[in-house]
Image (cartoon, helix red, strand yellow):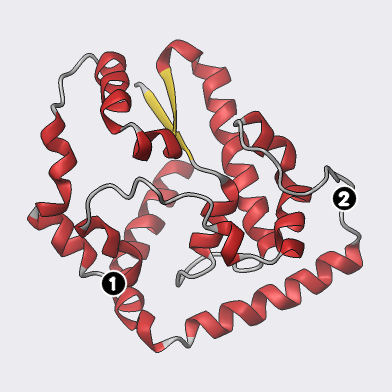
Amino acid sequence: PLYIHLIRDGRDVAASFKKTLVGEKHVYYLAQVWKNNYQKAKRVENQVGIARCLTIQYEQLISAPAEVLNQINAFLGIQIDESAFEFFNSEESKATAAAGTRWQNLTQPILSGNTKKFMSAFTPEEIAIFERVAGAELEACGYARVTPPNDVPFTPEEIETFSALNESMKRVVQQAGELEVDRLCRIQRNALLNELHAFSKD
């Protein structure tokens, strides 16, 4: 198999997941998830060889989609034309967008300016926490830090505080009425994911 690794600024990923029904909510844990996923992808790349892996930055994808499409075509040995950029008109995109607020952008053209959302979504302290957890990985991907480098591990007491806040934030999101459609749609999705996880352990 060939692998395409799509990387996005982890701070923007965290800002997005902070608003969703599932997953961690405190920036410390969101940073841990992004960091771990990045490290897993790099391990796959090391195991299978760089010739079978193509890394694409989300920011490049939305700013120069035609260029990235050419890279994908060359890597996979196929020919997808630029009509793919009309995805937002498809019935599949419309149906998926109707499944929950997280997917509504699927009915819009590529959002070329959809970057650095974390600057308004997080406080300076939250950005500093993310960069303290995953600053080295951000820099490895070409993303500059906003705060001065500080990779000193957090104390157990600090992590305990983060954990309590994380659970509280999860409860608030779970009770959000506007996410009810997401909640109902995820029942079937979660069943499929559980089946896939069980299969991968066999």
Query: Is tag 2's residue or tag 1's residue first in the polypeptide sequence?
Result: 2
Q: Which residue is mark 2?
A: 153
Q: Residue at x 30, y 24 (%)?
A: 67
Q: Which residue is mark 1?
A: 185
Residue 49: give x, y in percent of width and height: 50, 13
Q: Secondary structure at mark 1?
A: helix
Which is more toward the observer, 148 or 171? 148
How many residues crowd around disc 2 within 10 Å: few (fewer than 14), some, or many (20 or more)? few
| Residue type at tag 1 | Cys
Horizontal side of 84 relative to 186 (left or right) equals left
Which is more toward the observer, 45 or 135? 135
Q: Residue at x 29, y 33 (%)?
A: 65
Residue 5: give x, y in percent of width and height: 44, 31
Q: Is residue 166 above or below residue 154?
A: below
- What distance separates the C-alpha of mark 2 from that of mark 1? 38 Å
Q: Is residue 83 above or below residue 177?
A: above
Residue 186: give x, y in percent of width and height: 34, 69
Look at discs 2 and 1 and give the one toward the viewer. Answer: 2
